[in-house]
Amino acid sequence: MTERTGPGRRFDYKVFRYIGTRWSDNDAYGHMNNVVHYSLFDSAVNGFLIESGALDIKGGAEIFLVVETGCRYHTEMAFPDVVAAGIRVARLGTSSVRYEIGLFRNDDETAAAEGYFIHVNVDRMVRRPVPFGDVARRVLEPLLVET
Amino acid sequence: MTERTGPGRRFDYKVFRYIGTRWSDNDAYGHMNNVVHYSLFDSAVNGFLIESGALDIKGGAEIFLVVETGCRYHTEMAFPDVVAAGIRVARLGTSSVRYEIGLFRNDDETAAAEGYFIHVNVDRMVRRPVPFGDVARRVLEPLLVET
Amino acid sequence: MTERTGPGRRFDYKVFRYIGTRWSDNDAYGHMNNVVHYSLFDSAVNGFLIESGALDIKGGAEIFLVVETGCRYHTEMAFPDVVAAGIRVARLGTSSVRYEIGLFRNDDETAAAEGYFIHVNVDRMVRRPVPFGDVARRVLEPLLVET
Amino acid sequence: MTERTGPGRRFDYKVFRYIGTRWSDNDAYGHMNNVVHYSLFDSAVNGFLIESGALDIKGGAEIFLVVETGCRYHTEMAFPDVVAAGIRVARLGTSSVRYEIGLFRNDDETAAAEGYFIHVNVDRMVRRPVPFGDVARRVLEPLLVET
């Protein structure tokens, strides 16, 4: 997934979103189910995009579709933990972007889980890729990391 | 469900928990799905109980089981709203409690939705009702409202 | 919620939908979380409406909004149980309908949980109530029960 | 993720589980949210393991923890589609296994999405890896594919 070795740390990420866990995040093993991490990825990145003006869920002519996702799990988390979701951009193409997200449990400095997902910018109606507009590019470029 | 008429207001509730919405809370109609409200009820009340020392998910000899729930929906909410969940106790019996929860959208003073659920305190193993212990009672009594 | 006493039985319901449980339905107590029941209500009723031609999620001029829901829990269920969701209509008004749903665990004859929800038929754009059309009425009337 | 090129087909998988979609699987874009695919992976594989006698959620001395997951999305799915989840084992080690899952929309012969996850067999109490027992190995070996 990524060539970096070992769990990442907070300074490996550019912006953070804080997400409370929910009772239903815990599964039968009493820890946050592996599926929930992806829900946090989605919420962190889309929340950032909406507040930055780069995404308008209802009215925008373009939307972002997810074409690939992945996650590695290092440490268990559980409700009622609070999760800090760090975001960085590993690759920014003409119409696609690779986000990498680190999930940090409460005050931990080392990531409990790390994942990525690839967004493709598409026309809402025909769902075909179109180049990022100026706003999206201006919002995403500062998140780029050297890899 | 409740005899109070019209949507409640913040001063009708005793304690508040703040819960961020998630991308997946929005359904095909672009608003928070009616099911999600119950997930917020669960998270608000159980989060309060855990932090108050009245519930130990993993180790406690007693757990709370839900026997009845209900909700009325007044106003649509949607990701990325933040929800303030107000909690009060409407009835506190020997081994059961009726919580009422008001969900307030962002800074709204009037509830977007109001619901309740009834917890029964049971022995974890045999799952039969047992009277609330001192800690639970001390935590719940201050939330009681005149009805 | 309902004046009927005791858990309902299969013959109390008019049509059935079969829904597999999922790993994530089980919560930290190892049983289906109380929130999931509402997801099954939604899926059973909307699945029935779509297949009956009474609901077109994407293109219909009218949609159904949920204004009130409730549930009583009689027996625990858990993944990998299969749930039979029985549906009946308790009240059919000009623009609103009260569904009652019984959830039956595997081959059980007695309901594990029973709930209801009230749909209001609204114009998709302005989200104001409009009378049911002929198709919806023709689909819902056969589900009416004497109460 | 996998070296196979292009979406897989049904004959690429060894056993199938059929999973109905739910209303809440559709997100604001009107299609199955990317997170839900992982919930189907979990349900397909664990459902298979439970019915095969290789997993006892409540009583087993060993449980399976997920250490890595991934998914590629080829085609949109949406409620009320029915999903056929094909399962194969790509690698079976001493105490870990890599499952690959193809999700097929309704009667499609070509996968709508393909993913994997890696289970590690651990002692339930200390959560340290232990070698698979005879039952697990007997259940998993027939799912192995040449790669």
Image (cartoon, coloured by chain):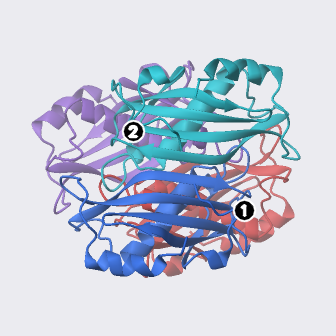
Chain colours: A red, B blue, C cyan, D purple
The quadrant where residue C100 appears: top right
Dot in front, 2 or 1? 1
The quadrant where residue A4 appears: bottom left
Rate crowding at label 2 as few (under 14), some (14 to 19) or many (20 or more) other CA atoms within 10 Å: many
- Parent chain of label 2: D
Label 2 belongs to which residue? D43
Question: At x 43% / y 78%, what residue is drawn?
Answer: A106
Vertical side of D35 occupied by D10: above or below: above
Vertical side of D141 occupied by A117: above or below: below
Vertical side of A29 occupied by A7: above or below: below
- Parent chain of label 1: B
Relative side of B77 to B122, left or right? right
Residue A88 at x, y percent in the picture = 60, 69
Q: Which residue appears farthest toward the right when viewing the image?
A: C126
The quadrant where residue C117 appears: top right
Vertical side of D141 occupied by B33: above or below: below
Residue A138 at x, y percent in the picture = 79, 70
Task: Tell which of D38 and B26 is nearer to you.
Answer: B26
Report the quarter where the N terminus of chain B lies: bottom right
Cα gap from disc 2 to disc 1, whole angstroms: 42 Å
Relative side of D85 to B10, left or right? left
Relative side of B53 to A133, left or right? left
Kind of residue sitting beneath label 1: Gly
Question: At x 75% / y 22%, what residue is drawn?
Answer: C137
Q: Is residue A81 visible?
A: no
Residue B6 marker = 1
Kind of residue sitting beneath label 2: Ser
Residue B19 at x, y percent in the picture = 57, 69
Residue C9 at x, y percent in the picture = 41, 26
Residue B106 marker = none
Report the quarter where the C terminus of chain B lies: bottom right
